[in-house]
Amino acid sequence: MTRGNQRDLARERNVKNQKGKNVASAEQEANKGLSLQERQARDAAKMREKQLSAQQKKAGGDNDGGNNNASGGAGATASAR
């Protein structure tokens, strides 16, 4: 069982994927010119928006609880009776 060049190709892919991941967060393009507190405030605001939209989506949805089966949410227990 020989691996051929699979190991070398995996190393090359890994190097390509890791490119730019060892840069400090303050030096990344989206964070240029922002202090730690400014970044935290920006990220917290984004998370609040996401949470609010998720709550609105959940409250204003089809009210089926996310269950997409044909039994209307009864599940397997109702059909077993």
Image (tube, rainbow, N blue to C red):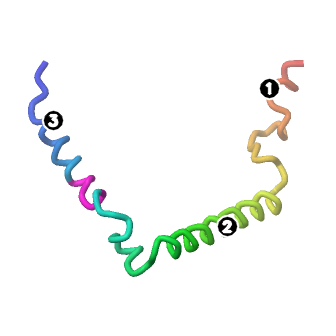
Q: Nearer the viewer, mark 1 or mark 3?
A: 3
CB of mark 2 within 8 Å of CB of mark 3?
no
Rendered view: 46 above or below 63: below
Q: Which region is colored magenta?
A: 16-21
Disc 3 crowd, CA 10 A, few/some/many (<14, 14-19, 20+): few
Q: Is residue 60 found inside the magenta-colored segment of the image?
A: no
Q: Which amino acid type is shown beneath numbered disc 3?
A: Gln
Give the mark toward the camera: 1 or 2: 2
In this image, 16 relative to 71: left or right?
left
In the picture as drawn, the residue positioned furthest to the right comes out as 81
Disc 2 is placed on an element classified as helix
Pick whichever, 66 or 48, lies toward us: 48
Taking the spot 58% from the left edge, 72% from the top edge, the residue there is 41
Q: Residue at x 80, y 47 (%)?
A: 65
Q: Nearer the viewer, mark 2 or mark 3?
A: 2
Q: In this view, does 57 lie above or below 5?
A: below
Pointer 2: what residue?
48
The residue under label 1 is which amino acid type? Ala
Q: Which of marks 2 and 3 is nearer the N terminus?
A: 3
Mark 1–mark 3 Cα distance, whole angstroms, equals 46 Å
Residue 6 tag number: 3
Type of the residue with mark 2: Arg
Q: Residue at x 62, y 71 (%)?
A: 45
Q: Residue 76 carries which label?
A: 1
Position in image of residue 26 (x %, y %): 37, 70
Q: Is residue 27 above or below residue 18?
A: below
Residue drawn 15% across and 35% down? 7
